[in-house]
Image (spheres, helix red, strand yellow):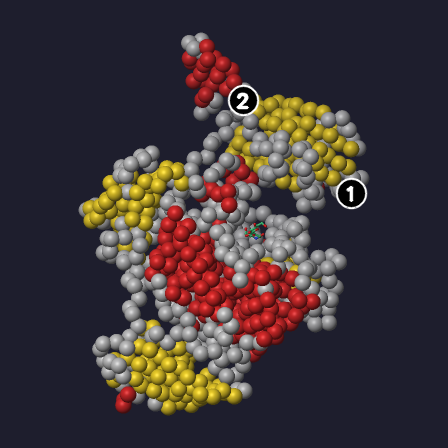
């Protein structure tokens, strides 16, 4: 409909004089340009890669290079301008040029055949001049382009633009997200015996009745809501509902309050194993340098990307950016970072680290479940190595290739990143990318990421592949030494053409994290000194924003608290994790949506979903340390937010929940742009609300948004809706943790006590006696005791039990004569072990018949 406001007001004109005033004001046709006055920045205006837009003076200026041929060789533009057929538009702008130049002012179709609806050739001079035009749109179009084509000059010149305005057409639509029913739940479900919380958006200020209905519509539980007032993160007046007391499994439940019925959900004990696997499977389809097999991921098969087959330039022999180095490296493989084709060591390091950590957690966390070979349907499945480690190795091999070779300047450092020399558009499958690939300068941050991830890999892969472990350890030590020699080489914040910058000028956290990993793997005192002398070792590293690629101290602290070691003061380190978790737990309790995330000024971060997930990692670690259910319950609540209990009433995980994010920004999951391409695979986490709304779509739709509302499931909204490896890594981690919670029933109290005594230790061996006491009240009739070594230790010979070993995990089973352990009685057995390399701390967890001992 055209100008509804005008027509409506014309009908009443003259009846009331104040209406006339309103009518006159509304008669001013609507403005279609976003940010034509450059009062704060210039987004969503864009420029071609050969100019830098500068709006610091309050107008939009750029130095236009000389030596280009065509007008379109240099462009300043804005996209997504709606046009309505038959409407007449007034277009104007103010321009200054030095020296004088004729440019092309166009309003056109943004794709071939680039049909021009307005084409003018203004002569722009040193005197600021307003140019005005009118035209009538011949078509209706949601996404016309306003473009200044200013190339073709032999010599350089400077252009400044201001007050760009296009008036006419329909009132721009005010974007209203479809938030569905006002009762907000975890749309996947709740653990049958776990905490069950929901939120109702309502105008009511007094408590309201709620009802829980089963799939047949029968009310199975009821109660009253708790009014919570106006929630700062959404601006909504809300009540919360706690229906934890209902604990019967089933599917298709709904929650009803204030006349609204929630989206359906399940109550079950196996809610998260599928999400864990899907979130991990995500990494295979992010692989670079290898064909993705459709047989393994139906609908997602694609040719290998960046292997040097035309039109790819390939990653097998990649030069540096001009002037950066004189060699080329084979940096093929690894995971694409996100929706672009870049590969970044900083982000790659934290991501692979969290996957390996998810696996390693099984060595100390009683609730951890195994990560078997064959779990993820990978090309490597069946090779005898847990699939999660196969997947992580794909990335580790790439990280190792990013190290500057011996004999070259900055040898041992890691190149910060490798990506295209120019930004590419969407869609673009990896094998179709024809841009030059370039290595960017080494950075201290990347070098320390490599050191931390490789040091961790050295111990975790040791039982599977000693040579690979040794390669990682050597690379980690070399990298750490190189970083200490070059402690302040920072990635440039302006090196962002063709890929993200991932710049970071504070690397004290990276130093702490890398030193922690090297200490845990080697036990060497030099690394211990670096750990304990870091100010971060005792600092409060638990910011409410959570940790991430730029702030990693928490990761170091978490590992120092959990990975078995002889760390002096380890109890205090463990206590510090618990106190961090207390802060997140308090945040959850205070938040009517149960979110453990309270960014300053309610300003949601880029990738806020991952900040939430990482705070859940801390809560989970506190559970692992204390065994206190309240921490596990808090982690459940945080997942509720990600899966639908939020202001937008949407799950941020593709394929999970009735309304879920599925148009994440990606060049190859570009279904929204090309129906022949798939959406992201199920289990893909969307970045989530980002108050800074840096992309044009978000700016057009979400300007003025409050916290949780700063998100749109649109493929071009790269600042709110991208997918990345470092966001899916904590999602997988938390899903694995929650899978280990079963149906939410509290873990049984220990019925055994293990005493593990190393009688002797020599350079490559040790001898150990193990005693298992039945501390329960019933006889144990047949037993298998399990534990894991830190690294490559192995059992060489044993007595009084039947030993077997798989990876680092040892099983000791009863013999016929010591099968029964009566209450209060013990059995004793022992073994001679081989240390291989590294420290040999006592195992942190013993389970007897699957149940943790004290
Ligand atoms: O996740 C990154 C976020 O923390 C930064 O604020 C943002 C801007 O520097 O960049 C994000 O990372 C993007 C990277 O630069 C390029 N690949 C896609 C990443 C996710 O959007």
Residue 617 seen anywhere in this rendered image of the structure? no
What residue sits right under mark 1 in the picture? 67
Q: Nearer the viewer, residue 368 or 542?
A: 542
Residue 694 seen anywhere in this rendered image of the structure? yes
Q: Nearer the viewer, residue 854 or 158?
A: 854
Mark 2: few, some, or many residues within 10 Å (few <14, many ≥20)?
A: some
Q: Position of residue 733 (x, y in %)?
A: 44, 61
Above or below, comparing residue 259 to residue 336 in the picture: above
Q: Position of residue 688 (x, y in %)?
A: 47, 48
Circle 1 sits in a helix, a strand or a loop, which is it? loop
Q: Residue at x 60, y 68 (%)?
A: 530
Counting residues from the N terminus, which is met first, the one under dot 2 or under dot 1? 2
Q: Position of residue 555 (x, y in %)?
A: 51, 62
Q: Is residue 221 left or right of residue 180?
A: left
Mark 1: few, some, or many residues within 10 Å (few <14, many ≥20)?
A: few
Q: Residue at x 44, y 85 (%)?
A: 758
Give the number of the mark in front: 2 or 1: 2
Q: Is residue 611 left or right of residue 409?
A: left
Which labelled disc corresponds to residue 411? none
Q: Which image quadrant: the C terminus?
A: bottom left
Q: Residue at x 48, y 60 (%)?
A: 729
Q: Quadrant of residue 490?
A: bottom right
Circle 2 sits in a helix, a strand or a loop, which is it? loop
What residue sits right under mark 2 in the picture? 29
Q: Residue at x 56, y 22 (%)?
A: 88
Q: Nearer the viewer, residue 461 or 577?
A: 577
Is the residue at mark 2 in contact range of ligand 1, meaning its CB lies under 8 Å from it? Answer: no
Label total for image:
2
């Amino acid at each position: 409909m055209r100008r509804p406001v005008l027509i409506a007001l014309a009908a009443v004109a003259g009846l009331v004089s104040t209406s006339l005033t309103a009518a006159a004001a509304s008669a001013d046709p609507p403005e279609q340009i976003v940010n034509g006055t450059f009062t704060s920045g210039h987004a969503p205006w864009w420029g071609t890669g050969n100019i830098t837009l500068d709006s610091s003076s309050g107008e939009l200026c750029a130095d236009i290079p000389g030596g280009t041929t065509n007008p379109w060789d240099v462009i300043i533009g804005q996209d997504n301008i709606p046009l309505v057929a038959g409407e007449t538009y007034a277009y104007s702008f103010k321009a200054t040029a030095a020296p004088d130049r004729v440019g092309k002012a166009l309003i056109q179709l943004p794709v071939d055949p680039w049909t021009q609806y307005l084409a003018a050739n203004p002569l722009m001079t040193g005197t600021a001049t307003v140019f005005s035009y009118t035209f009538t749109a011949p078509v209706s179009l949601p996404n016309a382009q306003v473009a200044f084509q200013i190339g073709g000059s032999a010599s350089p010149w400077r252009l400044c633009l201001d007050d760009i305005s296009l008036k006419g057409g329909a009132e721009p639509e005010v974007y209203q997200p479809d938030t569905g029913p006002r009762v907000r739940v975890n749309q996947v479900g709740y653990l049958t015996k776990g905490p069950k919380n929901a939120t109702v958006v309502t105008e009511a200020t007094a408590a309201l009745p709620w009802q829980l209905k089963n799939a047949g519509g029968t009310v199975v539980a009821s109660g009253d809501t708790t009014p919570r007032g106006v929630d700062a993160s959404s601006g909504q007046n809300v009540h919360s509902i706690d229906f934890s007391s209902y604990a019967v499994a089933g599917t298709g439940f709904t929650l009803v309050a204030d006349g609204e019925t929630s989206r359906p959900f399940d109550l079950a004990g196996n809610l998260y194993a599928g999400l864990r696997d899907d979130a991990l499977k995500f990494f295979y389809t992010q692989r670079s340098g290898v064909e993705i097999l459709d047989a393994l991921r139906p609908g997602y098969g694609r040719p290998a990307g960046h292997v040097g087959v035309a039109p790819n330039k390939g990653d097998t022999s990649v030069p540096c950016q001009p002037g950066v180095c004189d060699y080329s490296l084979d940096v093929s493989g690894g995971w694409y970072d996100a929706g672009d084709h870049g590969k970044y060591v900083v982000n790659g390091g934290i991501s692979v680290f969290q996957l390996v950590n998810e696996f390693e957690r099984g060595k100390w966390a009683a609730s951890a479940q195994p990560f078997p070979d064959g779990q993820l349907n990978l090309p490597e499945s069946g090779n005898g190595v847990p699939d999660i480690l196969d997947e992580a190795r794909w990335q580790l091999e790439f990280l190792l290739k990013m190290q500057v070779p011996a004999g070259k300047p900055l040898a041992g450092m890691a190149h910060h990143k490798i990506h295209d020399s120019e930004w590419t558009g969407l869609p673009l499958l990896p094998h179709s990318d024809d841009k030059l690939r370039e290595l960017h300068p080494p950075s201290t941050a990347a070098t320390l990421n490599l050191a931390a991830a490789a040091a961790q890999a050295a111990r975790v892969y040791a039982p599977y592949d000693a040579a690979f472990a040794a390669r990682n350890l050597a690379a980690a030590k070399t990298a750490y030494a190189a970083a200490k020699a070059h402690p302040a080489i920072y990635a440039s914040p302006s090196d962002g053409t063709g890929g993200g910058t991932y710049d970071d000028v504070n690397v004290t956290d990276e130093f702490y994290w890398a030193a922690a990993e090297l200490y845990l793997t080697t036990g060497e005192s030099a690394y211990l000194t670096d750990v304990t002398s870091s100010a971060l070792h005792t600092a409060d590293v638990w910011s409410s924003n959570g940790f991430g690629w730029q702030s990693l101290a928490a990761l170091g602290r978490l590992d120092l608290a959990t990975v078995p070691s002889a760390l002096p003061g380890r109890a205090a380190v463990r206590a510090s994790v618990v106190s961090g978790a207390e802060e997140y737990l308090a945040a959850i309790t205070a938040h009517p949506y149960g979110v453990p995330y309270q960014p300053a000024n309610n300003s949601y971060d880029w990738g806020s979903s991952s900040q939430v997930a990482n705070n859940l990692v801390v809560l989970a670690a506190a559970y692992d340390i204390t065994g206190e259910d309240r921490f596990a319950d808090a982690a459940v609540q945080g997942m509720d937010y990600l899966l639908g209990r939020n202001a937008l009433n949407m799950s941020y995980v593709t394929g999970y929940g009735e309304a879920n994010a599925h148009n994440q920004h990606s060049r190859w999951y570009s279904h929204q742009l090309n129906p022949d391409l798939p959406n992201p695979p199920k289990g893909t986490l969307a970045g989530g609300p980002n108050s800074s709304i840096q992309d044009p779509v978000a700016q057009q739709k979400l300007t003025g948004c409050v916290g949780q509302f700063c998100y749109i499931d649109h493929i071009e909204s790269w600042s709110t809706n991208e997918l990345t490896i470092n966001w899916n890594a904590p999602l997988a981690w938390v899903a694995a943790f929650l899978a280990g919670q079963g149906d939410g029933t509290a873990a049984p109290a220990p019925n055994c006590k293990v005493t593990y005594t190393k009688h002797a230790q020599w350079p490559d061996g040790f001898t150990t006696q193990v005693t298992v006491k039945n501390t329960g009240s019933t006889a144990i009739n047949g037993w298998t005791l399990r534990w894991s070594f830190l690294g490559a230790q192995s059992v060489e010979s044993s007595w009084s039990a039947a030993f077997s070993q798989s990876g680092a995990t040892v099983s000791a089973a009863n013999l016929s004569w010591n099968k029964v352990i009566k209450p209060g009685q013990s059995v004793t057995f022992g073994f001679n072990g081989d240390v291989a390399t590294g420290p040999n701390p006592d195992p942190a967890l013993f389970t007897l018949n699957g149940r943790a001992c004290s």
